Amino acid sequence: MNRLVEGFPAMFYAAATNDAEDFRTWVKYGGDVGVIHKASGVPLLAFTILQSETLQTGPTLTVATLLSHEASYNVIPAAFYTPYWRDLPDPSSDNDILTDLTDEHGDWCRES
């Protein structure tokens, strides 16, 4: 359940199916909901949310499954959702809005 498949944690493939029932089975048998892709630093929760760009349907149930099995929501920097009505600034501009991208949780989502 927690092995690498072609450099990616197997749980990433389980999440990519966007089948919440199958994903819960992976978790039930020991799949790690807090796994991180080592090369990029992207956590499973972020990957699952970001894959909505390529899916026909949103990953809401898979995300809910992750959170209900204690995946840390802290891997998503607060600057992305607090306050919820603010658009994110251009990443190339210097600003003080995205301050929490400099901590260990924000490393995966920097422009570089």
Image (tube, helix red, strand yellow):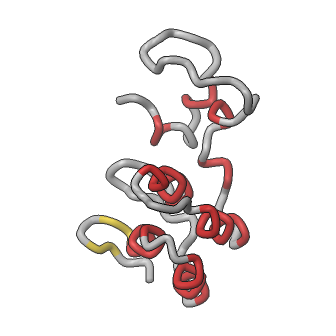
Is residue 105 toward the left or the right of residue 111 in the image?
A: right
**Quick one: which residue is furthest to the left in this view?**
6
Q: Residue at x 44, y 49 (%)?
A: 53
Quadrant including the C terminus: top left
Q: Residue at x 76, y 29 (%)?
A: 83
- Counting every numbered tag in the picture gives 0
Q: Residue 78: x, y in percent? A: 68, 36
**Depth check, front residue: 55 or 32:** 55
Q: Residue 26: x, y in percent? A: 52, 84
Does 13 sit above or below residue 95? below
Is residue 40 toward the left or the right of residue 87 in the image?
A: left
Does 37 sit above or below residue 74? below
**Quick one: which residue is furthest to the top in this view?**
94
Q: Residue at x 45, y 42 (%)?
A: 108
Does 87 sit above or below residue 66? above
**Quick one: which residue is furthest to the front in this view?**
56
Q: Residue 38: x, y in percent? A: 37, 56
Does 48 sit above or below residue 103? below
Q: Residue at x 55, y 90 (%)?
A: 29
Quadrant including the N terminus: bottom left
Q: Residue 88: x, y in percent? A: 58, 24
**Depth check, front residue: 9 or 13:** 13
